[in-house]
Amino acid sequence: MSFLSRPFPLATLAPALLPLIALALTPAHSAAPSGDRRVVEQTPGLVGFWTFGEDTGQPRVSSGTKQKHALTEVGGPIPRVAGGPFSGYAAELDGQRYFKIPYAETGDLNIAGPSAPVSMFAVVRIVNLKQSRTIAGMWSEGKGRDDDTGTRQYALLMNMPAYGGPNKLVPHISSEGGVTRRADGSAFPWCADYAVTAGEVPTEAWCTLAFTYDGKFIRAYINGVLDDLKLDPVAHKRTDRYFTREGPGGGDRGMNPYFHGRGIFAYDPVKHAQSKPGGGSDFTVGARYAVGKMLGEATIGRFGGLAVFNRALTDTELKKLHDAANLPALK
C-alpha cells in the first residue's frame, strides 16, 4: 500500500492546517440568523411562515406548517441578501417583482367566513412609503374607484390616506370582497374597513409589523406594540355615519382597534361568476392587484420573515414574536 492510499487520521495533520480544513468544509456564503425561528413555529395557529433563506430563483417554502406553501417569484429573480432574523437572509424587493401563491393553491391560507379570525406578522425593512404600500395578503381590489369586482379578504397594507391612514400601518379586512357597504346597502367608492396606527411605519430600518382580527376588531401593531388610536372623525376623514354610528351599540368604530365585525369574504366560483369574473385572490407578498394593475403600490425593501395564523394572537404573543426577531442585531 502506497503512502497516498493508506488511511490518514486527521489528527496527525499539522495543527496549522486544521483551521484551513474547517474553513473549506464550511458552506459558502452562510449567514447567521439574528433571531429565533422556533418562537414563530411554536406559536399556535401557524399556517404560513417564510424565512426567505432560499437562493434567488427558488420558491420560498413555508416552514413549520402543515402545508408547504411555496411563494414563487413574479417579474424575475428576487435577490437573496445576507442579514435576516430567522434564516440569516432576506428577500430584497425592488417594486417591480413580488411573490405569489395562486388562489387555487392557497389551501389553509384561504381564511374566510363570517367569524373567521386571522393574524399576520412581518419583519421588514421598508423603503419609500410613497410607493411601498403592500406587505402581504389575499387582496385583489379590482379596477379602481367604485369597482365592485374585487375579491379582497385580508391584508397588511401601508399608507392609505383616503380614510385617515397616510404613512400609517393599515391592516384591512373585507366582508364584501369589493367596496364597503353601509348598513343600508349603500356603497363607498373604496374598501373603507381598516385599522390605522397612531405612528407612522418606520422606513430605512428593520421593524416588525403585524395585525390581528378576532372576528370583531382589527388591531395593528408596530414593533410588537398595539399602537392605539382613537377616532377623530374630522381629522381622520371618517365623518360618514358608517364610521361614527354603525359601530358597537350604535357608537363609532374606532381607529385602532377598529370594529369590523362582519367576517371575511369567501369567494364562490358559482355565486360570483358574473359579479367577480377575475376569480379569487392570489396570496401575494410585496404587491397586490389594485386600480387595474399589480405594481402600482408594490413594495421596495427587504422581507426577513412573514407569518400567517388562523387565530387572533394576543398582545403578549405579538410582543414575543417581535422579541424573537432580535432587531438590534440586524443591520
Image (cartoon, grey):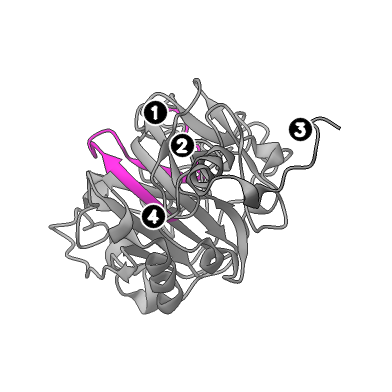
- Residue sitting at 18 percent across and 62 percent down? 233
Between the C-alphas of marks 4 and 2, the distance is: 14 Å
State the residue lying farthest toward the right: 1
Circle 4: residue type: Pro
Q: Residues within 10 Å of mark 4 (few under 14, many from 20)?
A: many
Q: Position of residue 196 (x, y in %)?
A: 28, 58
Q: Could you tell me which secondary element the residue under label 2 belongs to? A: loop
What label does residue 56 carry, if any? none
The answer to whether residue 207 is visible is: yes
The picture places residue 90, in percent across and down from the top left corner, at 43, 42
- Inspect the image, locate mark 3, and give the three-letter code of the amino acid beneath it: Phe
Evaluate if marks 1 and 2 touch, with contact meaning CB atoms under 8 Å apart: yes
Mark 3–mark 1 distance (CA, rounded to whole Å):
74 Å
Q: Write the start and end of the magenta stretch as one range.
A: 122-143
Q: Are marks 1 and 4 in contact (CB under 8 Å)?
A: no
* Residue at the front extreme of this rendering: 2
State which tag comes first along the sequence, 4 or 3.
Answer: 3
Residue 37 percent location from the top left of the image: 52, 61
Please give left or right for residue 227 compared with residue 275 in the image: left
Circle 3 sits in a helix, a strand or a loop, which is it? Answer: loop
Kindly state the secondary structure of the residue where label 1 is placed. loop
Q: CA distance from mark 4 to mark 3?
A: 69 Å
Say whether residue 261 is magenta: no
267, 168: nearer the viewer: 168
State the residue position of label 2: 141
